[in-house]
Each structure stands twice: as structure tokens, then as C-alpha cells.
Image (cartoon, rainbow, N blue to C red):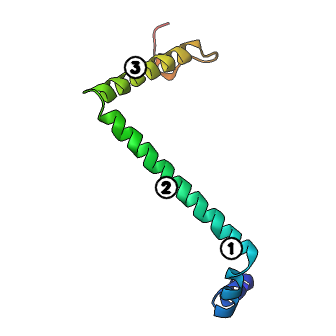
Amino acid sequence: MVLRRLLAVLLHNPQLVERLSESRPIRRAAQLTAFALLQAQLRGQDAARRLRGLAAGPAGSLGRRAARFRDTFTQELRRGLRERPGPPPPGSQRGPGANP
């Protein structure tokens, strides 16, 4: 609690904030932060441009790709569950009143 109050008092001191902003470590941290934000923005714009290009492709191309992905994912998931060692999947277990 005391540390939080001391930090708040120091950060509300304009002269201290000005001196810290001119220090080399703080300037370098600001440069790295700006660089990271700019790179993230550029990558996001590039991804959006590529996605728009995919959507603007042949009619239904994106829909076919999504359906193919869904089908492949479902097949792989089912195969993985069948080949999994251990207890059977929850839907195939017999309850206390089931016929053996």
C-alpha cells in the first residue's frame, strides 16, 4: 500500500516524468513498442488483404475450402477417437441398467 502511494506521487511529478522520458532506457522501450505496434498493424492489414483476395476469388471457392476443412477435421477427429487407447468414448459406455 505504501509502495503504491509512493509510486503514484512520483508519477504525478511532472519534472520526474520529463526526466524519465528523456532517459535512454525509456526512449528505447518506446521505440520497441512503436515498432511492435506498427508491425502488428501491417501484418493485420496484409492478412485482411489476403482474405479479401480469397473471398473475391472464383464463386464459392472460400465456401468449398471451408467445407473441405470441416470434413477433413471431422474425419481426423473421429479417427483419433477410434484409435485412442483407454476407456471408450462417453457415448458408447453402458449404464447400470443396460443389457450385457
Quadrant in which the N terminus is drawn? bottom right
Residue 91 percent coordinates (x, y): 46, 20
Q: Which of 53 and 17 is in front in this view?
A: 53
Q: Which tag, 3 or 2, sits closer to the chain's start? A: 2
- Gap between marks 1 and 3 measured at Cα: 51 Å
Q: Which tag, 1 or 2, sits closer to the chain's start? A: 1
- Gap between marks 3 and 2 measured at Cα: 33 Å
Q: Quadrant of residue 65?
A: top left
Q: Would you place residue 78 above or below residue 49 in this image?
A: above
What amino acid type should be assigned to the residue bearing mark 1? Arg
| 52 relative to 73 in the view: left or right | left
Numbered label attached to residue 71: 3
What amino acid type should be assigned to the residue bearing mark 2? Gln
- Give the structural element (helix, strand or loop) at label 2: helix
Report crowding for label 2: few under 14, some 14 to 19, many 20 or more residues within 10 A (C-alpha). few
| 1 relative to 73 in the view: left or right | right
Q: Which residue corresponds to the image point at 49% horizontal and 52% vertical from the top-left?
A: 42
What amino acid type should be assigned to the residue bearing mark 3? Asp
Residue 8 percent coordinates (x, y): 66, 86
Disc 1 target residue: 27
Task: Find out whether the residues at labels 1 and 2 contact each other: C-beta distance under 8 Å.
Answer: no
Q: Nearer the viewer, residue 75 or 39?
A: 39
Disc 2 target residue: 41
The tally of labels here is: 3
| 19 relative to 45 in the view: left or right | right
Residue 79 percent coordinates (x, y): 52, 14
Residue 52 percent coordinates (x, y): 34, 40
